[in-house]
Amino acid sequence: MRNAFAAELCGLAAHDERIALISSDIGNNLFNEFRERFPSRFMNCGIAEAAMTGIAAGMALCGLKPVTYTIASFNPGRCVEQIRLDICLHNLPVVIVGVGAGLSYASLGPTHHALEDIAWLRAIPGMTILCPADAVETRCALRAALAHDGPVYLRLGKKNEPAVHAGEPDFEIGRNIPLRGGEDACILAVGTVTPIALDAARLLEERSISCAVTGIHTVKPLDTDSLRSVFARYPVVMVMEEHGPVGGTWSAIAEWAAEQNVGTGRLLRCAAPDRFFFEGGGQNWARKRFGIDAEHAALRIADALRAVRP
Amino acid sequence: MEDLKEKAAALRRMIIELSCQTRTSHLGSALSCADILLAAYNGGLRISPEEASHPERDRLVFSKGHCALALVCALSQRGFCTFEHLLEKFNRPGGLQEHPGFPYVPGVENASGSLGHGLPLGLGMAAAARIGQMNYRVCVVMGDGECNEGSVWEAAMLAPALGLNNLCVVVDFNRWQATGRSCEITRLEPLAEKWSAFGWRSVECDGHDPERLRDLLTAFGQEDRPTAIIAHTVKGKGVSFMEDDNNWHYRIPNAEEAQAALKELDR
């Protein structure tokens, strides 16, 4: 994902002189091409996320389209207030990139886990939150983010994420992408867990349960048209994401559903619990420990279906 | 050009009237940075109401948003809006709040109120000038208490490394912050030496000498480094019973006090 991001950014920067990149002492070699081709538009601001964010806002106030980049636990973690006031209050076109979001850096420890970032940024007025599912969607999302006239948080994994899309999907901010049809249940998959959702749907198919999968790349604003039809159709809906229970996509959808008074079935959450995670073993291990795996998701959906229509 | 000293007294009268009539606080801090703003908007920086949105205008980033009284009065005095406009905007429900939002009064470049934001913003603006090959300069006005914020020093370390000589910070060094002496709460001094050690050209001056401030602001940008002007000021400057009395950080003058203050400034 991050390689696709860096390559796409170079392509876009070649056609738009307003694009500038600020990196907080990260991305060794990742941005070599950008630095060589656009030296005046690359800044390594040092290990200084607060300053990075203010600098980006200052650049945007003077007509540039800056991109800030570091690990998601720090960007936005170290600079939420700067994002709120410097970027969002001024409604500036800055793309805030958090790389290694969720459990991408599971083995590095809780300092490097980003399981609260969506909650922090969802709460800020004017923010758009994009969680691409794979490298192809990353390119689409970056393009859309830089064309968007306002703040965007781009939540990325790290590298070698399995591909979800064979070719470029029809990508538009705030519009979900249906990935697989189904009759009985639906998984709303957010970002890099999407391949797990698709695997779960295949496992359910083996058990004669027809499960749809819809990709949610935009967590804010939600695609409420898509959600309305999902809730109208399926008695069991599962939100799968690499985020904690408070303020993530599941929260966003549950809040929306309560306010709209839609949905009479179950809204399952397949995501991280409300606790720090200290076990080594890597991302797949961490996901399994949290129940974010195809087998577990399929079991829960089958159980929920039995409960709603015994 | 009218004598800057006379303009300074007039600016202080506006600030006191606006504070009293609109019940707006932070008067002491506003009076301490009045001469800095006066100098910046009257020759120190290339800023004028006629070219308020010119891409090559100099930028004044006001980082101590709690002193908006001084900012809006200085802009009004410079012709960005009438004083009546300010009175109306600050008094009317649905009008302006104390700390600058965005947009705010014409001429205000940024929202402010949370401290430590101005220098990174200004650094970004100065870097954007480089990227766009433009000649404007950026001046950040901030407080001495504000130097407590870590984001100030993140930007302070970076600006000289980038060689941003089109960036200047003016520290309104009035030696008070909200709850005590700024040099006692943190080890703020030696302040000019701190900026020098961080790679800035630092200059100390009387922060109530608008002509000296104007000259310093006119001149910066020629060196190989950013400039830090440590402006020695007095909180509540110009009004005997407010000077160096930190009660005026939050206090708002009643009609009698305002009259007494205006009388002193009429002398």
Image (cartoon, coloured by chain):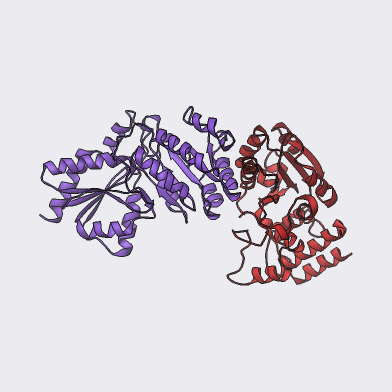
Query: In the displayed structure, does residue B115 sit left or right of residue A7?
Result: right
Residue B80 is at least partly visible in this image: yes
Where residue A300 appears, as percent x and y from the top left, is: 19, 45
How many numbered markers are drawn? 0
Where residue B38 appears, as percent x and y from the top left, is: 78, 55
Where residue A52 appears, as percent x and y from the top left, is: 56, 40
Query: In the displayed structure, does residue B45 sit left or right of residue A72?
Result: right
Residue for point 34% across, 39% down: A134
| In this view, A184 is above or below A298 | below
Query: In the displayed structure, does residue A86 sit left or right of residue A114?
Result: right
Say which of A175 and A78 sits in front: A175
Say which of B16 and A13 sits in front: A13
In which quadrant will I find the N terminus of chain A? top left
Say which of B30 and A28 sits in front: A28
Query: In the displayed structure, does residue B200 sit left or right of residue A159?
Result: right
Chain B color in figure? red
Say which of B261 and B157 sits in front: B157
Q: Quadrant of residue B228?
A: top right
Residue A73 is at least partly visible in this image: no
Where residue B15 appears, as percent x and y from the top left, is: 75, 63
In which quadrant will I find the C terminus of chain A? bottom left
Chain A color in figure? purple
